[in-house]
Image: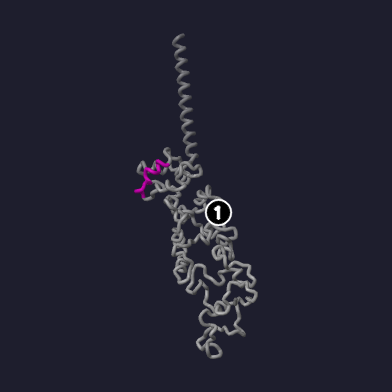
Amino acid sequence: MTVLRNERTDRSWLCLMLLLLLTSVGGSVAGAEDAADAGPEFTRRGADSCLACHDETSEYPVLDIFRTPHGSRTDERAPMAGLQCETCHGPGGDHAARLRSGEERPLIPMFNDEAIHEDADGHNGVCLDCHDDQHRSDWAGSDHGFAELACVDCHQIHAAQDPMVGGFGEVEVCMTCHADVRADFMQRSSHPVREGLMACTDCHAPHGTADGSGLVAGAGTDTCYSCHAEKRGPMLWEHAPVSEDCGLCHDPHGSVNPAMLVQRPPLLCQSCHSSTGHPSLAFTGAGLPTGSPSPYLLGSSCLNCHAQVHGSNHPAGEALNR
């Protein structure tokens, strides 16, 4: 009787162990499937795992980020106060594990220039998760947005000083693409950009504007008036191009003509004003029809008489001459 009870007990224990083993295997398989579905893992040591390689000697040094707002641990809005490096770069567990094993490691997308331009909207979305405010709400309709530029084409996130923020290093960044504008700024008459007294963003809004002009104060003349307030009307006697668009007469980036004019007077003036019945015909090889140049065309040309070309408040200044 005792022997029979022992045999039954042994069978029960055997069945129980087999059941536990099957449960364990099933759980391991399910756990593996869940882990696969979960995707890449975050690194266990956070930024410490990244900084072990990406120090000042690395091809991709990142330590200067701690000298920027992004690297603040006390500001809850900063990436470093959250998931640290992986807030922007995504889970880096696989990247770090392959490095330790000596395998060829996949680049995290934010490091891969080709991946950035294949999916500029996706990469910009990482930045816009935090920076989607009124200053960047028009990015989707901007020229830079249509050109599929990535934020990191202009901004340096890991640099102690992003050249596009708080300094005039932005001019050099802009000129890497806008070489034609660089040439304009080298002409005899231009805004003082190359002297360091102005920057591109004094006039342009690189993240776009609601009216699509890309100018900080909107299309038309308001951007110019933000510096040249003395030209703002209303005037008693107005010169129509002045209130319409300064660019009708001036090239804002620079010109070979004085005052950044698109043409020299009197040719510029005669592009709108007929010379019929007026002694202001342009110079020709034979002079004027009278056989000699008019003295009114010498020196400042039309401005010899019409000096108040931007408008006049004088009661007798209908012809903009006083």
State the residue lying farthest toward the front: 315
In the rendering, at what x and y percent does residue 178 appear?
47, 64
Magenta region includes residue 54: yes
Colour convention: one colour
Quarter assignment of residue 221: bottom right
Residue 114 vertical position relative to residue 305 in the rendered view, above or below: above
Residue 265 image point, x, y percent: 54, 78
Q: Is residue 83 visible?
A: no
Residue nearest the viewer, comparing 36 with 228: 228
The residue singled out by tag 1 in the image is 135
Kind of residue sitting beneath label 1: His
Residue 143 versus residue 191: which sits nearer the camera? Answer: 191
* Residue 245: quarter of image: bottom right
Spot occupied by residue 73 in the image (x, y as percentages of width and height): 46, 42
User: How many marks on residues?
Assistant: 1
- Which quadrant of the view contains residue 311? bottom right
Relative to 3, is 319 on the left or the right? right
The furthest residue to the top: 1
Say above or below: 168 vs 187.
Answer: above
Please report the bounds of the magenta region as a residue range.
47-58
Q: Residues within 10 Å of mark 1 (few under 14, many from 20)?
A: few
Q: Is residue 88 magenta?
A: no
Tell me which residue sits at (37%, 45%) in the image: 53
Q: Please, what secondary structure does the residue beneath circle 1 have?
A: loop
